[in-house]
Image: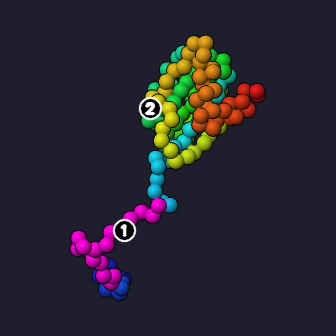
Amino acid sequence: DSLKEFLAKTPRTPIDWSSSAATTTTPASRERSGVRLCRMLVVATEMDAKELAGIQADAGKYNLGGYIKSGSPGLVVVEGLEFNCDIFMDNLERQKKKFGKAGKVNERSQRAFPKELTKLDGDSAMDDFNKFLEAVGLKESLDNALGA
């Protein structure tokens, strides 16, 4: 069948294009508060300053924000679109075998972390990292990964 024949056989549906036509609204159950975000915890046995800078650059390529802590253990928590988190993790695992995903949560919400991967250092770095993870539901994943 040609396109003309197909269209000739297709039933027509009248559509009121006038401005007086009733507009449809999104039902309350479908309204969205924020976008669907992924938060992923990545753990390494250790991470030096050079690796930290490379990971920050990679996270920027995928529009991921969050926190990073070098040392032993090396910790990264990223936040962004799930697709971007997954690609970031795939690349990280392929390039640097010592990194592994320790936890992941997906939820519809506003951003909880900075829009760039922010370095935590100093005496309070681990405590700060724990607080940030607790706020987004990844603290238990960190405890499991570290054997606590």
The reply to whether discs 2 and 1 touch (Cβ–Cβ < 8 Å) is no
Name the amino acid type tagged 1. Thr
Name the residue carrying label 1.
24
Which numbered circle lies on residue 115? 2
Left/right placement of residue 70 relative to residue 35 reads right
Query: Residue at the right extreme?
Result: 147
User: Is 76 in front, or is 21?
Assistant: 21
Q: Residue at x 57, y 12 (%)?
A: 122
Q: From where the camera sits, is residue 24 visible? A: yes
Note whether 94 is above or below 25 in the view shown: above
Report the number of numbered marks: 2
Q: Residue at x 31, y 72 (%)?
A: 22
Q: Residues within 10 Å of mark 2 (few under 14, many from 20)?
A: some
Note whether 7 is above or below 97 in the view shown: below
User: Is 39 in front, or is 43?
Assistant: 39
The secondary element bearing badge 1 is classed as loop
- Residue 16, quarter of the rendered image: bottom left
Q: Tell me where residue 75 appears, x and y as whole percent.
A: 61, 25
The span picked out in magenta is 12-28
